[in-house]
Image (cartoon, coloured by chain):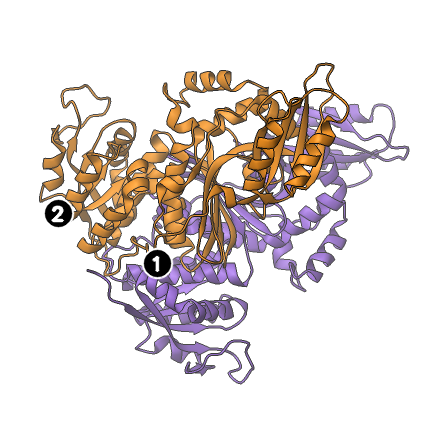
Chain colours: A purple, B orange
Amino acid sequence: MKNQTNLVRVGLLGLGTVGTGVARILINKGAAIRRDTGLEFRLAGVCVRNPKKKRDISLKGVRISSRPAELVREKSIDQIVELIGGVEPAGALIASALRGGKDVVSANKALFAERGLPLYRLARQTGRHIGIEAAVCGGIPVIQGIQSGLASNRISRIVGILNGTCNYILSEMSRHAKPYPMALREAQAAGFAESDPTLDVNGTDTAHKLAILARLAFKSEIPYARIFREGIERVTSEDIRYAAELGYSVKLLAIGQREGNGALELRVHPALLEKRHLLANVSGVNNAVLVSGDETGDIMFYGRGAGQRPTASAVVSDMIAIAQARRHNVNNLDPIFSTAGVRPIQEIRSRYYLRFQVLDRPGVFGTLAQILGRHGISLSSVVQKETNRSPVSVIVLTHRTEESRVQKALTAIAAQSVVKEKPVRLRIVDPETP
Amino acid sequence: MKNQTNLVRVGLLGLGTVGTGVARILINKGAAIRRDTGLEFRLAGVCVRNPKKKRDISLKGVRISSRPAELVREKSIDQIVELIGGVEPAGALIASALRGGKDVVSANKALFAERGLPLYRLARQTGRHIGIEAAVCGGIPVIQGIQSGLASNRISRIVGILNGTCNYILSEMSRHAKPYPMALREAQAAGFAESDPTLDVNGTDTAHKLAILARLAFKSEIPYARIFREGIERVTSEDIRYAAELGYSVKLLAIGQREGNGALELRVHPALLEKRHLLANVSGVNNAVLVSGDETGDIMFYGRGAGQRPTASAVVSDMIAIAQARRHNVNNLDPIFSTAGVRPIQEIRSRYYLRFQVLDRPGVFGTLAQILGRHGISLSSVVQKETNRSPVSVIVLTHRTEESRVQKALTAIAAQSVVKEKPVRLRIVDPETP
């Protein structure tokens, strides 16, 4: 019989939204977790910036300090749960915890995206575990799915909606034809966007999450800085409407793709998705990730991508899994064997949605078509929106072509005197070939 | 450094579709699995009905026999992978393996749905592990998601499309207005339905999978025989079309729901789903499961629910996870603490789609409405399909009401002389309240 209870002493760094959620689960659900898993988690210490601040949870009997460096060196602690965020001092604290023989659970996207590899290496050297399920997609167990559920698969592609703020804004722009600034203000009022939303709307947060997922899916170190990044700030409700008329939704996508030669394509940008695509129907603050394995085919994970309770749930599921793995002789949490070559965005191939604002004069479309043709870009459909104003909108969907051709063609077209605005370029992601 | 390779000796029972897929992964991907996990799986013995039969994989050096009882007693074997299916002798073989100190991986739905509890108990007594990810939804890691990814959640509901054959048939009926027998024949021709499809189309397979998921989600033993079961054999393309006009898709759903008092609602039946519901967009042979956790909210797992490679992938992911857990002191694979009370189908509450074939005479609708009203059933919409024939179709959508009221009202309505066919009754599943 293997029913004894194992005690796990936890040091918690940070008592913000997620930290409070974790403490709450450990307090309110301690008995259920003990019954289900045989593990008893005890909060041995909590580290906060201001220990005197009033909290809306009771931490009676828990040592509260403002000295994280001491807590991570505390001999009696088994797990450090890092929820302070930011690259430093979080990185140094985690390294110190690993060196001291502690397992680490973290929700720190920026740190693990930008400087994950040395921490994984250190964990391997010290035989410790790192759990970062909470760093990507809140309570959705997508990291576990990639690392364990699809363990025997060679993963060729991940496509995800990884940022709830952007998805909420785009959903609102789409449903109510709201302009971007209005949708952003409303998202802020509803608590779905920060007062400074820059890192969400410019794609940085999504790129961090893509780096973390791609590292684990492709078992390659990801040069974070080389992930192509384009945000949603310049997406207009007009383009969303035109896309809808053509049968597409606009989403901010993270795309990671492995080519036959091992090179990776890694990009974050707004994209048109056919409405029948599963990801096209993921709306509001929800997240979803489509993972393509050679054995399983496409597997999708879907759910709330953020928020106190879902994210805290992911932290606690890592704490449980790691405590159960404590006696493993095998460490599969450092599956990184190479640094991948990354294909420059100019070399990707995609279909494109292009919009031109042109004077409504005879021969204008001929000029556009000629320039596109000269760059080897063939068109799958053309729509001129009827208006009684000039300039008019001409919308072109292309067949698959190389991004560099499109860039050159757009530069040539923008220089035409009949073209009145910078052309709009959005990539189209097909279900089979993103 | 924890990099040594652990040898895992495997006894494989059955070399049908899934067994061949597992052998193929172990042979073709042995090196990748060793690199990623530090585990070396060695096929120590394979048991088949006819050892002389030609196979399309090479098992050179592997002992092939037709005596499963010997293989499961073989001292040197660490894991038994049971892929022969059926309740017996599979159950006795697994019990023997567990008693002999072996871990077990199985894809056996019927066995674990109908007689899972004693096997889990035996595994707990002997300190062994049982992995049955492959029994539900092929390569989709939903069992792992429920057991580990959502470990700190109290799960209140699971709603799933668990049978690819039924989903394929309903999708074809819906897209091409095909009658059921034609869609079934085509599914058989395409290899998506067995020559005897009974256990798929009558809901038995779905109920088996629901029993397995519900046991793990609700941590209660499920009295399999008490799961309400209604198949897709009587769904007509006419009703699918009417449902579509009203904004609904028809799916065969498995629904498991825990009430505040701990009683369970467990049912398998065709249901109308609003088209904006995520599950409504799961088409063809795909499966999906929506799991509602108190911390995470709704999480969905989606993918191919069957087939050699996805199912074999799930088997191998269990083999890896269990081999890694071999030294655990904690066994969380027997989380069953009680036997649940099951709410009889007559007591469930739902919205309903009802169709009546009635003579086109004055006062007929009044008669229907009166009988429904007398049974306390209020209507949310009524459509009479225009035709120049009599009888005509009258379609009624109800508000939420108790199933027993609907049953009584339909009996009373069926007895009316103006009613020409047995009324059609389909349950409607709302996103929030199935």
| Residue B100 circle label | 2
User: Which residue sits furthest right?
Assistant: A388
**Which chain letter goes with mark 1?**
A
Closer to the camera: disc 1 or disc 2?
A: 2
Give the class, few, some or many, for how many residues have Cα within 10 Å of label 1's Cα (few <14, many ≥20). Answer: some
Q: Position of residue A95 (x, y in %)?
A: 37, 68
Q: Is residue A118 above or below residue B147?
A: below
Q: Position of residue B366 (x, y in %)?
A: 74, 31
Q: Position of residue B283 (x, y in %)?
A: 52, 31
SS class, disc 1: helix
Across the whole image, how many numbered discs are drawn on residues?
Answer: 2
Which sits in the foreground, A68 or B94?
B94
Left or right position of B284 against B392: left
| Residue A321 circle label | 1
Q: Quadrant of residue B64?
A: top left
Which sits in the foreground, A2 or A210?
A2
**Which chain letter goes with mark 2?**
B
